[in-house]
Image (tube, rainbow, N blue to C red):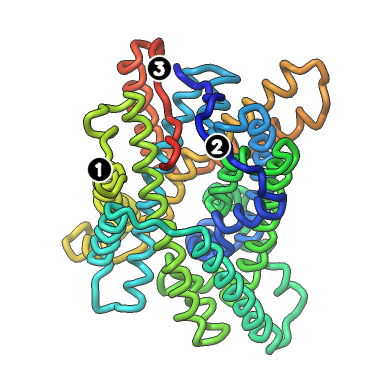
Amino acid sequence: MSTEASTITAGPRLRRTLTLWDLVLYGIIVIQPVAPMSVFGVLSDRGKGHVVTAILIAMVAMLFTGISYGRMARAYPSAGSAFTYVAQEINPAVGYVTGWSMVMDYMLNPLICTIWCAGQAHQFAPGVASWIWKIFFGVVFTLLNIRGIKTSARINTVMAILMGMVVVVVVIAAARYIFGVPHDASYFTTPFYDPHTFSWGGVFGCTSIAVLTYIGFDGISTLSEEAENPRRNILLATVLTCLVIGILSAIEVYVAQLIWPASQPFPDINTAYSYVAGRAWAPLFTVVGFTLLLANFGSGMGAQLGAARLLYGMGRSEALPKSFFGAVDPKNRVPRNNVILVGAVAIIGAFLLEIVAGYKTYALGTNPLSWATVKNILNGGEAYGLGAEMLNFGALIAFMGVNAAAFLRYYVRSDQKKLGYLIPPVFGFLICLGLWLNLSKPAIIVGSIWMAAGIAFGIWKTNGFRKQLSFELPPED
C-alpha cells in the first residue's frame, strides 16, 4: 500500500511565511466561530440541557488529539493525513480502515449542510416545504462546484470576521436579557449541571455529537510546508485553535441555555439558536439565521468539492475505477463526475436520513406510519442529528487512529519514555473511544455497515491488502 509522501518537488518551493497566529486564524476560519450554533438544538435535546458540559468534555478530547496531530505532522510534514499516519506507524490495512472512515466524513459533510440549509430556508419561507429546499440546495451546490467556483481566502477571512461580530452582538443581547431579570445562583449553574435531568449517558451521548464543533482543526497540519518553525508551531496552533473554539463555543451555548431552558421545546430543533437569539433581541432571529445559512452554504459547497477531490485521488490511484472517479472536466478543471455523485448522495441521503430518523420517532411511537406522517417527517429536522453522529462515527475512528499512531511512534518506539508522550495519546484515544461508543444505535449500525462494505471492497481490490491504495487528496492545480 502506497503511503509514503513524495519528497521531491519540481519548480519553486513554498515559502515559509505563516506565523503561529496565522495558523491559529486559519484554524478558526476553517472551524467557524459560530460552529456550535447550527447543532445547538440537537445537542440540547440529546444532553437534556447539558450542552456546555459536553462542549468542554469534547474540547479536552480534541486538545489531546490535537497534540497527537501536531506531533505526527512533524514526522510527515508534507502529508498531513490520518490515513498516512496510521498506515506508516501501525499497519497499511489499519490505515486503509482509517482512510475509509475519512471517506464517510467527506461524503456526509455536504449532506448535513444540505439538511441544515433546507431547514433554515424553510423558517424564512415556510410556504416552501423543507424537502423542496433540500433538492434546491443539493442542486445549487452541485452546479456551482461543476462551474469551478471557489471561495477565496479573503472571503473566508471576511466571513469569519462578520461571524465574530454576530457572536459579540448575540452575547451582548443575551447579557441584557439575562440580567434584565433577577435570578438566584442555581439559575447560572444549571447549564453545567441540572440534578433533575443529568445522566452520564446523556452527557456522553451529547458530547459524541459536540465533537462536530471542532471538526476541521486537523486541517492546520496540511500547512506544514508553509509554516515558520513547523515542528513547534503546527502543534501549538492546533492546540490553541481547539482551546479558542472550545471557550468561544462554551460561551455561546451557555448564554443560549440561560435564555432558553432545556425544559422548553424548540419550534424547530435544527434552527434552535435562531429562536434563542430572537428571544434575546427580536431582530437577531433573522440576523443569526441568515449568518448561519451563509456559513453552512459555504461549508456545504466546500465539503462537496472536498469529497469530490478525495474520490478523485482514490480514482487516480486506482483505489476506485479510474475511468469514472479519476476523470477531470477539461474546461473547468474539476472532477465533474464526482461532484455530481456527491451531490446526488447529499440529496438522496437527506431524504433517507429523514425517513430513518423519523421512522424511529413516529412509527415506533403512537403515530401510525401514514403518508401524512411521511410528509411531516420530510418537513422535520430529525435527520440532522443522525447525520452529525454518523459523520462523527468516522471522525472519531480517524482521531483514535492518530492517537494510536502518536503513542507508538513517540512512546513505544522511543528511547525516552516521557509522560508527555504517553498521556496525551492514551487519554485522547480513550476519550474518543468512549464518545464513539456513546453514539446512537442507528449511527453505529449505519456506520458499521459502511465500514464493513469498505473493508470488504478493500480486501477484494487489493487481493488481501497486498496491492496499493491511497486516500490522499491530490494537490490543487
- Mark 1 or mark 3, whichever is nearer to me: 1
- Say which residue appears at 37% left-offset and 52% top-offset: 110
Q: CA distance from mark 2 to mark 1?
A: 25 Å
Q: Quadrant of the N terminus?
A: top left
Q: Nearer the viewer, residue 14 or 341?
A: 14
417 to the left or right of 353: right
Q: Is residue 272 above or below residue 397?
A: below
- The circle on residue 330 is 1
In the rendered image, which quarter is residue 113 located in? bottom left
341 to the left or right of 440: left
> What amino acid is labelled 2 in the image?
Pro
The residue that mark 3 highlights is: 468
- Say which residue appears at 59% left-offset and 69% top-offset: 161
460 to the left or right of 238: left
The residue that mark 2 highlights is: 12
On the image, the x and y values in percent for residue 432 come to 60, 38
Q: CA distance from mark 2 to mark 3?
A: 30 Å
Q: Nearer the viewer, residue 3 or 98?
A: 3
Disc 1, SS:
loop
